[in-house]
Image (cartoon, rainbow, N blue to C red):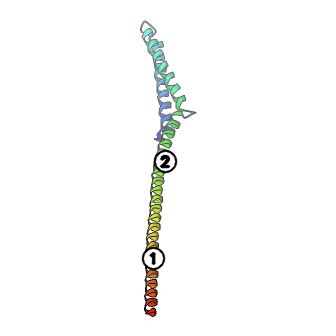
Amino acid sequence: VFVYTELIHPLVMWSLVQVEHLVVYALHLVGFLLYGPQNYVLSRLRRRLRHKRHVKIAMTWFEGPYRTAVRRVQRYWRARQMRKRAAYLLERIEQQKDAFEARKAYQAARKHLDDLEAAATMKRRLEERHDRAEVKALEAFQQRQ
């Protein structure tokens, strides 16, 4: 698309304008040679061709120095690429958020497991202390007897 709009299209338009110039000049020549009632038809045809030529010249100026159509095409493709890039980045951000939330959930679960282990250890220590106290009380009772 870029090669056509930058290189080929202006040459095509220029060559079409040149061909129409030649056709108009040929019609002028035929009009001068025939100079009679048919000259009215030829002059109308010449006016039409001249109008078409002016329209094409205006279109080549539209395409020519300012390259407006080329800029529109490039702007469209750049915007399309930016939309694709934005969608990709949004997807990556979502994946990172999911990974962050998974890490957070893992750490919370790990903390909960650590809390459960600490509670079990504390319960075991309390039971051991209670057992030791019972053994001491039993020994003291036996010594009194």
Q: Write down the quadrant of residue 68 in the picture.
A: top right
Dot 2 falls on a residue whose secondary structure is helix
What's the amino acid at mark 2?
Answer: Ala
Can you say whether 55 is above or below 124 in the image? above
Can you say whether 74 is above or below 43 in the image? below
Residue 86, label in figure = 2
Task: Identify the residue at image location x=46%, y=69%.
Answer: 115
* Quadrant location, the C terminus: bottom left
Q: How many marks?
A: 2
The residue at which mark 1 appears reads as 121
Q: Write down the quadrant of residue 65 in the picture.
A: top right
Task: Identify the residue at image location x=47%, y=27%.
Answer: 19
Task: Identify the residue at image location x=48%, y=35%.
Answer: 9
Residue lying at the far right in this picture: please name it: 65
| Residue 96, x across and y down, in percent | 47, 57
What's the amino acid at mark 1?
Answer: Thr
Can you say whether 47 is above or below 103 in the image? above
Task: Identify the residue at image location x=51%, y=37%.
Answer: 70
Observer-nearest residue: 52 or 33?
52
Residue lying at the far top in this picture: please name it: 37
Observer-nearest residue: 52 or 70?
70
Can you say whether 87 is above or below 128 in the image? above
Q: Give the Cα distance between marks 2 and 1.
A: 52 Å
Pair 2/1: label in front: 1
Dot 1 falls on a residue whose secondary structure is helix
* Of callouts 2 and 1, the N-terminal one: 2
| Residue 141, x across and y down, in percent | 44, 89
Observer-nearest residue: 93 or 29?
93
